[in-house]
Image: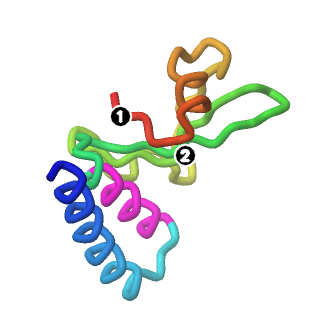
Amino acid sequence: EERAAELTRANTALRAGLDRLAGERDPAALLSHVLGATADTLGARGAALFTYDRAARRLTMARVVNPDLAPTATGEPGATPFEADADATPYWRTLLAARAPLVL
């Protein structure tokens, strides 16, 4: 039953996402929609996308969607991105080992 409910949520989010995709021309807004749908599907309050610089071993928050923050809080020209040392980030190794979304 839990798996069926999870699949139903995922399908609902996918349908809503596809409707938004069809009309969205702005890549930043599209990414915000995808992150929002991901958060909804996982039952999370928000979602963030980080890029990883392998040479520098740094994580940079490229985009965040959270009801407590403006959807464009990061990832916009002129915004100061959140950066962290990947080796000092406690969840980085967990995320790599799980190869799945990490819900905190």
Observer-nearest of 57 and 8: 8
- Distance (Cα) linking label 2 and label 1: 18 Å
Q: SS class of the residue under badge 1? A: loop
Label 2: element kind: strand
Q: Quick check: is 7 in the magenta stretch?
A: no
From the top left corner, tell me how far across and down residue 45 is, in percent.
23, 40
Q: Which mark is residue 103?
A: 1
Q: Quadrant of residue 104?
A: top left
Q: Is residue 88 left or right of residue 91?
A: right
What residue does disc 2 label? 62
First in sequence, mark 2 or 1: give its number: 2
Compared to residue 80, the image places residue 65 above or below, namely below
Q: Position of residue 8 (x, y in %)?
A: 20, 65
Vertical relation: 90 (above or below) 36:
above
Q: Position of residue 31 (x, y in %)?
A: 46, 62
- For the record, the magenta segment spans 28-39
* Image position of 34 (left or right of 95): left
